[in-house]
Amino acid sequence: MGWSIHLHLISAIAWIGGAVFMFVLGIFMRDKASQREVYPRIGPLFGYYQIVSLLLLVSTGGFMISQNGMLPLLLDGNQSEIVSTLQKKLILVGFLIVLTIIHFIIAHKTNTKERTILQNIISRGSSLLIFFINLWILHYAIIIRHYL
C-alpha cells in the first residue's frame, strides 16, 4: 500500500476531524450573532478544505482498491466478508458525496445571507447525516483494515 494508506489516513483525519469540529461548534455556539460572525468567515475556507480532503480520500481509496486487486472482486459478485464490508463502505461514501455536494451548494449560495426554512432544514440535516455517516464509514474502515 505504501504512500497511499498514509495519505488516505491523513485525509480521513482531516475530513472527520473537521466534521467533528464543525459539529461541536454548531452545537455549542447557540448565539445567532456569534454564528453570523464566525460561519461566514470559516465556512468557505472549511468547505474547500473538506473538498480537498474528500477528493484525496476518494482517489487514494480507489487507488488502494485497484492496487489490492479488489476491483474485480467488487465487480464479479464475490461475497467474502471483506468485499461485502467494502461494498457497504463504498455505498456510504456515495451517500456522503451526494450529501456533501448538497450541503456545499446551500452553504455557498447562502454564505452571508439569511437562509430559508427549507435551506436551513436541508443544510442542518445534511450536516448531521454527514457527521454520522462519517462515523459509520470509519467503522467499516476499521473492519477492512483488520482483514488486510
Image (tube, rainbow, N blue to C red):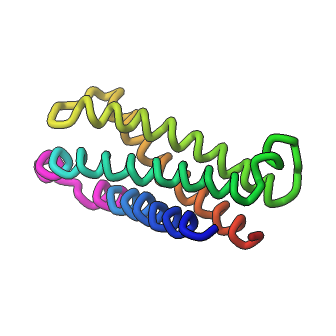
In percent of width and height, residue 79 lies at 88, 51
Identify which residue is drawn at 45% across, 48% down: 128
In percent of width and height, residue 139 lies at 63, 63
In percent of width and height, residue 23 lies at 36, 56
Identify which residue is drawn at 38% across, 37% down: 103
In percent of width and height, residue 136 lies at 60, 57
Vertical side of 134 occupied by 113: above or below: above
Identify which residue is drawn at 42% across, 54% down: 53
The C terminus appears in which quarter of the rendering?
A: bottom right
Q: Is residue 60 left or right of residue 72?
A: left
* Residue 34 drawn in magenta: yes
Which one is in front, 34 or 72? 72
Q: Is residue 145 left or right of residue 105?
A: right
Vertical side of 116 occupied by 91: above or below: below
* Residue 54 drawn in magenta: no
Snapshot quadrant of residue 147? bottom right
Q: Is residue 132 left or right of residue 68?
A: left
Which one is in front, 118 or 80? 80
Report the magenta residues as a range. Answer: 23-38
Looking at the magenta stretch, what is its main secondary structure? Answer: helix
Identify which residue is drawn at 40% across, 62% down: 14
